[in-house]
Amino acid sequence: MRIKKFVGRQSSAILQRIKEEMGEDAMILATRQSPDGRIEISAAAEGQHRVAPKAMADTPRPGFQRVTASPSESSELSIDRDIVALKEEIAHLRRSVQSVLTEPRIDFDRDMPPIVAALYRRLYRNGIDDVLLEDIMLRLSRLVSPTGTVPSAEFRKIFSEVIGDTIRTSGPIGENGVRHVVFVGPPGVGKSTTVSKLAARHLARGKTVAIVALSDPRIPMGDMLGKIAKLIGVPYALAGTRGDLTEQLGKFRDLDMVLIDAYGESPGDSEGMVRLTELLDQPVNLERHLVLPATATERYLVSVGERYHECGFDRLLITKTDEEQRFGSMVNSIVRLKTPLSYLSTGRRIPQDIRVVTISDLLGLLLNGQLLQ
């Protein structure tokens, strides 16, 4: 199954292109008009992409000898290519099939209430995924009268409910009674700063807190977090092995909270991911936050999330929201990873620049490109 989006000014011309490129049996999945007036049509078809006759020329280039695979080798290569293509497309197809095939299609300029259409254009510009955006619009359209004559405050409340059903939030650390919290993620996403903020906040509320930093023996590390811990007045320890971490957690067992700063592990380092996963295999219950930057692309965020699933994270924490203005990639990734959101980090100040995520925060990012004060 191939899925492709065609864009143009006239639907008849787009349909002709679909027929030429994907064949007579191509199936139309979605049709919509973008804010700039262009028409977008998504189509699907079985089989491989067509290749123009000139691309099929059988004459080898000078200086090269053509190598012909055996029938069995050709078959295996073809199957491998099919598998790769299917893996890339199946995720999108699964997410889109319900809204595409079981829901009525929307003419976004004609069928939506005006207030919903205005929101659609704003979210579209913010980079919200097509399938997610249509799902949001369908749900809003069911809740708002066709005329769209609803006070803005009431519409905001309706939109809040829809976003609340789309993105789950987990609340602050420690709310579920778990006292040991670990923060994992790639290098440079702000884990150490995040741990420092949360430690200082809990200390200011009269809680007893300790910080444990996980060290990677393959990589020399500085001790900036240790200096910050000393500055804010919390116990600090290093742990380089699973046994070290077990020992330190036992040492701090009487404290209200132990925050664990995992070293930054590249998602592409399979050996390192295995080591980190084994290190976090502890006799105590660990609450696990995957720390991701708001500035990254959706593709990167989702790929990191998929690799870090080996560590068993159960929450997402987003940093660097002060460095981004379009939050579509962030929202798309949160929805695709199907994991509750805990905190948003909004700068480098300790402890001010971090907040427990609320639906109002998400509305501020989606509608205004910034958090509401």
Image: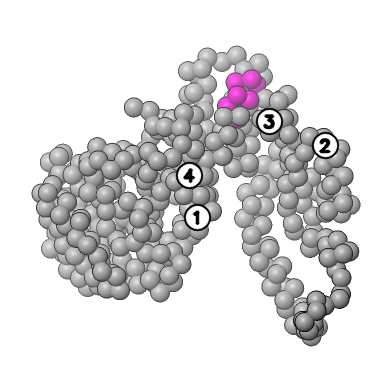
| Secondary structure predominantly adopted by residues drawn in magenta | helix
Does 289 sit left or right of 333 as displayed? left
Q: Residues within 10 Å of mark 4 (few under 14, many from 20)?
A: many
* Residue found at x 52% / y 49%: 298
- The spot of residue 68 in percent (x, y) is 80, 83
Identify the residue position indicated by label 2 in the image. 11
Query: Which element carries disc 2, helix, strand or loop?
Result: helix
Give residue 330's mark.
4
- The spot of residue 110 in percent (x, y) is 73, 24
User: Magenta includes 119?
Assistant: yes
Give residue 300's mark.
1
Question: Is residue 355 shown above or below 19?
Answer: above
Give residue 109's mark.
none
Q: What span is in magenta?
A: 113-120
* Residue found at x 16% / y 57%: 226
Identify the residue position indicated by label 3 in the image. 36
